[in-house]
Amino acid sequence: MNIFVRNSLFFGIFSFLVSGAFAGNIEYHLNKSANPTDDEREAYALIEAAMDSAVFLYNKYSDLSKHIEVYYSTGVPTAEASSNGDLRFGKDRNYMFVGTAMHEMAHTLGMGTTSDYKAMMDGGVFKGEKAQALIKEIDGKDAVLKGDSQHFWPYGLNYRSEVHSEQDLINHVKIVNAMYQDIFKEAFYKQGRIKSLGDTKKCMGITSSNALELMDCADTATFVKIYSMGDKPVTYRIQLGNRVVDIPNESTAAGVTASTYGYNGGAHQKYQFEDAGVNTPNAVLLKNYKSGLYLQAVGKNVVQNPMPSRSDDFIWKIEEQRTDTTEKPVSISKRRTPNKNLEESMPERLFDALGRAVGKIRRGVTSRILKSN
């Protein structure tokens, strides 16, 4: 696999100052040995620096969601990834770098790893209107986004010669974001609360331990964002913070309690919204796309079950909250693992173009390099 390799070329150290909240919800978990060797400890540090930078860029310049499981695998020659969310770095330290991480993250998002992606290539040209419009905006009216069954260009970060500045990394993210929308027809739908019309009249929310639970609708942990996907049929994912409503182990069995998990694109994390047939605005039935079962309010839990009759505990009301367009300064947040508390602040760091941590930022003060590597 041709991927962007770190070299001695100096890109310059840059910092990121952010206006407005991160739109993306990509997170990762680095799997580590219980008793790491010196080699593993060194590799983990390099991988974390690369992934922290890559995830930051994706979350700042896209609205994509994904949970990525990252591994250090000495048997991998360079690096590799699949659309199920697995990403592996091999032993070669030259690939433990932000450019490689971003290239492989695109693979986890379906670029070059799904039949949907391949279907969008026609004679070596990507057919998506949004991505083609964006490449012309970036590189001029004659620019064309091209590719093959595995990679795309320009801005695919397939070779080190593709990257000359920070802007090339940003353009990569923007192109992947547009391609994803073209391929999977994903769009923001609504935000607010999902309230049970059963006896409890409570809303879906996420607990401090990431469980899905029905709770008081005034609780900030009940705030959801809903995204539509596809067109035949249209399905939806229900997002709570950096996680989505998930059926554990992709189970199709009745009686399974729904939970939350990082989004990986599985059918068990998608729902079809069916009209509830009641005289209540935005009242729907939530049918899991994989199991074909419906979400039911059972005590404080949300359980997937068949629906023999249309009772109130199967009916959910989407209480829509209009988008707040007010921009507030937000500083860099490391997003390695999901927040257990949605209000919890995260450590703040700066990274250079080679993925190296170079310091911290102080809130309310112009960012500057505090320590060089």
Image: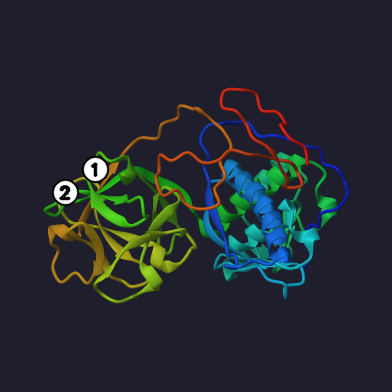
Q: Of 92 and 105, which appears nearest the observer? A: 92
Tell me if 103 is positioned left or right of 10 in this view.
left
Residue to which mark 1 is pinned: 217
Q: Would you identify the image quadrant in which residue 223 lies?
A: top left
**Quadrant housing the N terminus:** bottom right
Q: 185 above or below 290?
A: above
Q: Is residue 140 visible?
A: no
Q: Residue at x 36, y 67 (%)?
A: 247
Q: Of 360 and 153, which appears nearest the observer? A: 360
Q: Residue at x 63, y 44 (%)?
A: 57
Kindly identify the amino acid type of the residue bearing the numbered disc 2: Lys
Q: Residue furthest top?
A: 365
Tell me if 108 is positioned left or right of 237 in this view.
right
Q: Would you identify the image quadrant in which residue 209 lies?
A: bottom left
Image x and y of residue 11, in percent: 82, 41
Image x and y of residue 344, in percent: 43, 41
Q: Secondary structure at mark 2?
A: loop
**Quadrant housing the C terminus:** top right
Distance between the alpha carbons at the discs numbered 1 and 2: 8 Å
Residue to which mark 2 is pinned: 201
Kindly identify the amino acid type of the residue bearing the numbered disc 1: Cys
- Circles 1 and 2: CB atoms closer than 8 Å: yes
Q: 277 above or below 39?
A: above
The image's colour scheme reads rainbow
Please rate how many residues cluster around mark 2, counting C-alpha atoms within 10 Å: few if below 14, some from 14 to 19, many from 20. some
Q: Secondary structure at mark 1?
A: loop
